[in-house]
């Protein structure tokens, strides 16, 4: 039973990334792969901060900021 719950929850997490890719490729007609880079960057940032003793909320906030920064760099690079 634990395997089923874990599999479903991981599927929901990956579906968010799939929706982001679908929106950029199909709806906006703009091939942008920032989603594939920002998810691992956010995960590594959050895990590193949590393991170093920071609170989970702080780690998620900083991971969000790093993801936004990655998108900003991508936007500046595109121009």
Image: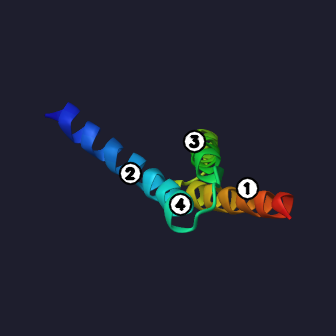
Judging depth in this view, the residue of 20 and 29 nearest the camera is 29
* Mark closest to the chain's N terminus, 3 or 1: 3
Residue 75 x, y percent position in the rendering: 78, 63
Within-10-Å neighbours for mark 1: few <14, some 14–19, many 20+:
some
Q: Look at the numbered disc 2 and give the secondary structure of its residue.
A: helix
Q: Residue at left 58%, top 38%?
A: 51
- SS for tag 4? helix
Q: How many marks?
A: 4
Pointers 1 and 2 in contact (CB under 8 A)?
A: no
- Few, some or many residues within 10 Å of mark 2 (<14, 14–19, 20+): few
> Which one is closest to the eye, mark 3 or mark 1?
1
| Label 1: element kind | helix
Residue at 62 percent of width and 41 percent of height: 44
| Quadrant assignment for the N terminus | top left
Compare marks 3 and 4 and give the one earlier in the sequence.
3
| Drawn side of residue 34 relative to residue 39, left or right | right
- Secondary structure found at label 3: helix
Q: Pointer 2 and pointer 3: residues touching (CB < 8 Å)?
A: no
Q: Position of residue 67 (x, y in %)?
A: 66, 57
Sequence order check, earlier mark of 2 and 3:
2
The first of marks 1 and 4 along the sequence is: 4
Location of mark 4 (residue): 57
Indicate the position of residue 45 as horizontal and vertical percent values. Answer: 64, 46
Nearer to the camera, 43 or 17? 17
Q: CA distance from mark 3 to mark 4?
A: 12 Å
Q: Residue at x 59, y 52 (%)?
A: 35
**Residue to which mark 1 is pinned:** 70
Determine which residue is flagged by label 3.
47
Label placed on residue 15: 2
């Amino acid at each position: 039973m634990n395997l089923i719950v874990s599999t479903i929850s991981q599927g929901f997490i990956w579906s968010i990334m799939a929706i982001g890719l679908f929106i950029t490729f199909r709806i906006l007609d703009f091939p942008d792969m920032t989603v594939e880079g920002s998810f691992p960057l956010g995960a590594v940032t959050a895990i590193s901060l949590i393991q170093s003793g920071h609170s989970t909320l702080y780690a998620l906030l900083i991971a969000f900021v790093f993801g936004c920064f990655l998108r900003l760099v991508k936007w500046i690079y595109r121009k």
